[in-house]
C-alpha cells in the first residue's frame, strides 16, 4: 500500500497545526483515490532568504523529496512560513505537475494577515482549497477554467474564496484515475 502523506513542517507549532491538518486530511481523503496518512516533517528554516524574509519553495520541495517516507506515493507539507519562488512576490503553495512532493503555506490564508478580524471557518476553508489544489497538481491536474473548482488558479485570497472546497466533476474524474 502506498499513501498520500500530509504533515506540518517543524516550524509550525503543534497546537497551530492540529486543526488545519485535520481539515486538510479530511478534504484530501474525499478527493483522491489514495489513503491519507500523517507524518511529521523537518523545519524549513534552512530555506530562508534573509533579504526577502521569505522561504524558497524550490529548496523546500528538494528537501521534501529526500524526507518523504518510502511508502509515500505523494507528500504534501503544510508550513506556517511565507513561501516564494524567485519570479513571484509569494506563492500560496508549490508542487510539480505529476510530482511526488508539494507544499502549502498558511501564512497568507488568515484574515489577520490582511488586517481583518480572525475567521476560523474562512481560514480552514482556504487551507483545504490550497491543499486540494497543490495535491491536484501532484496527481497530474492542470489549472481549471472553472473558477469555482479548487484547481483554478488563485493569486489572491479573493480568488481562493470564490472556489468551492472541492474539485469540479471533470477534475475529480481525472484525479480518480489510478495514479502511476
Ligand atoms: Zn496551481
Ligand atoms: Zn476543475
Image: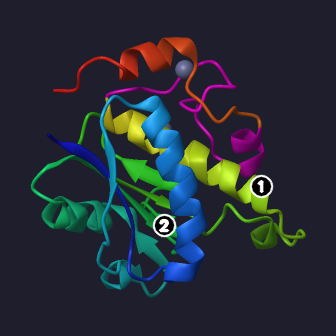
**Under tag 1, what secondary structure?**
helix
Residue that carries the numbered disc 1 in the rendered image:
121
Quarter of the image where one finds residue 16: bottom right
Q: Is residue 131 left or right of residue 44?
A: right
Can you give x and y, in whole percent of width and height, for residue 38 in the image?
A: 35, 60
Residues tagged 1 and 2 counted as in contact (Cβ below 8 A): no
The mark that comes first in sequence, 1 or 2, is: 2
SS at mark 2 in the image? strand
For marks 1 and 2, give the CA distance.
23 Å
Q: Is residue 166 above or below residue 173?
A: below
Q: Quadrant of the N terminus?
A: top left
Can you give x and y, in whole percent of width and height, for residue 71 in the image?
13, 50
Which residue shows up at 31% across the image and 61% down it? 58
Ligand 2 occupies quarter: top right
Residue at 39% x, 73% y is 9
User: Quarter-wise, where is residue 106 in the image?
Assistant: bottom right
**Furthest residue in direction left, as rendered:** 70
Residue 91 seen in the figure: no
Residue at 69% x, 32% y is: 164
Report the span colored magenta: 140-161
Helix, strand or loop: magenta stretch: loop
* Tag 2 residue: 83
Residue labelled 2 has its Cβ within 8 Å of some atom of ligand 1: no
Position of residue 57 relative to residue 155, above or below, is: below
Residue 66 horizontal side relative to residue 25, left or right: left
Amino acid at each position: 500500500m502506498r499513501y498520500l502523506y500530509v504533515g506540518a513542517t517543524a516550524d509550525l507549532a503543534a497546537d497551530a497545526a492540529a486543526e488545519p491538518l485535520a481539515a486538510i486530511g479530511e478534504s484530501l481523503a474525499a478527493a483522491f483515490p489514495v489513503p491519507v496518512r500523517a507524518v511529521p516533517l523537518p523545519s524549513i528554516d534552512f530555506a530562508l532568504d534573509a533579504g526577502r524574509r521569505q522561504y524558497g519553495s524550490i529548496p523546500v520541495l528538494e528537501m521534501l523529496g529526500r524526507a518523504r517516507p518510502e511508502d509515500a506515493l505523494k507528500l504534501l507539507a503544510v508550513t506556517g512560513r511565507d513561501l516564494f519562488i524567485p519570479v513571484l512576490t509569494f506563492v500560496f503553495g508549490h508542487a510539480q505537475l505529476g510530482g511526488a512532493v508539494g507544499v502549502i503555506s498558511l501564512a497568507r490564508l488568515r484574515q489577520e494577515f490582511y488586517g481583518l478580524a480572525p475567521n476560523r471557518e474562512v481560514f480552514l476553508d482556504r487551507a483545504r482549497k490550497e491543499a486540494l489544489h497543490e495535491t491536484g497538481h501532484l496527481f497530474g491536474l492542470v489549472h481549471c477554467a472553472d473558477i469555482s473548482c479548487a484547481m483554478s488558479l488563485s493569486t489572491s485570497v479573493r480568488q481562493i474564496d470564490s472556489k468551492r472546497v472541492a474539485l469540479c466533476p471533470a477534475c475529480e474524474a481525472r484525479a480518480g484515475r489510478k495514479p502511476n
